Amino acid sequence: MSFFDKQLFTIAASSQFLAGDAWQEVSSGVTSILRDVTYGNNLWVAVGNGGVILTSTDALTWTSRTSGTSNDLYSVRYGGGLYVAMSIVGNLLTSSNGTSWTLGSITSGLGYSLAYGNSTWVTVGTSPFIASSTNGTTWTSRTNPGSYGYEAVTFGNNLFVAGIGPQFIYSSDGTTWTLGSSSGSVAVRNITYGNNLYIAVAEDSGSFNNIYRSTNGTSWTLQTTAGTREWRGVAYGNTRFMVGGSGYISVTTTGTSTTIKTGTSSKTIYAVGFGNSRFVAVGSTGYIIRSLV
């Protein structure tokens, strides 16, 4: 790997150059922790501590937006023509264009993670709470079949899936939830779906390189890959999963092994997104890196 001031490039040994093989660090203009990033309607949106909202059309130049709150924002997603962002203390923010945001409220404890699919929004929290919405503004609490709260939720293959580590739950409609099964107990931080595979990254203090895998979203197996990374973010795109955490970005196609692509030990990556043929990762002290394809 080669390290440069403000630019970080890693070129894979393979002759085939794919998204995630080379990365560039860009300026976010903020020093707050950035906790999530999403892409929709030709716009990247990143959110973080202190109510920070950033937008970009190319993941290179980022613009700060007014959120109307100083609370930490943990999640953001785009779906059904709407951007939705949440804090875990009851802030709900919505926007039709990503630049102007309306501040509302939701039950405190929700907002750790958001998902959208089949015209339905779902959010989960560690309190524990589960809620769903058809419009992103009015939310209804749902019954939790498990005994834990949840930090991550995703939608894929017509199924919502949420997890915390000892437990995974799933739902076809976001309303009625069923308890799944898991072989592990490491805390789940993020979940995604791609190529007929659900992948959940997990980390606990002193427990490294943990990835849960599932082919159906209901039964999960914990896979510990080689290395000493605490994974926090994951996204799927261009035939591969990109996982991030402990400052590093790694690639995996099956979740059974990972290969480091870029990173620095002085940063922590909290989330990874994919859109417009590009990966973007965000993290501590305003850290943003984008893949060059």
Image (spheres, rainbow, N blue to C red):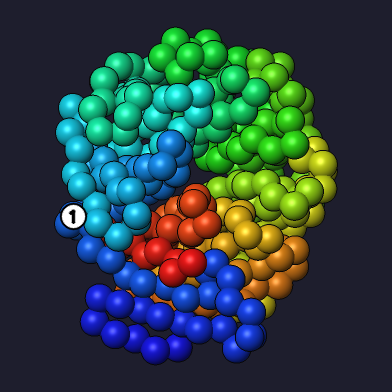
Which quarter of the rendering shows the N terminus?
Answer: bottom left
**Can you tell which quarter of the image residue 177 is in?**
top right
- Please state which amino acid type lies under the numbered disc 1: Val
Left or right, 28 with respect to 250, comes to left
Residue drawn at the location 69% of the way across and 50% of the way down: 194
Q: Nearer the viewer, residue 119 or 150?
A: 119
Residue at screen point 45% across, 18% down = 136
Q: Count numbered badges in the picture.
A: 1
The x and y percentages for residue 147 are 65, 29
Q: Is residue 22 left or right of residue 146?
A: left
Residue 106 in sight from this viewpoint = yes
Q: Secondary structure at mark 1?
A: loop
* Residue 93 pos. (x, y %): 32, 25
Residue drawn at the location 59% of the way across and 37% of the way down: 153
The residue labelled by disc 1 is 30
How far across and down, in percent of the image, does residue 143 sit? Answer: 64, 16
- Nearest the viewer among 246 and 288 is 288
Q: Is residue 89 visible?
A: no
Q: Position of residue 84 (x, y in %)?
A: 40, 28
Residue at 33% x, 17% y is: 105
In the rendered image of this protein, does residue 230 appear above or below residue 72?
below
Task: Give the camera-side residue of 42 and 158.
Answer: 42
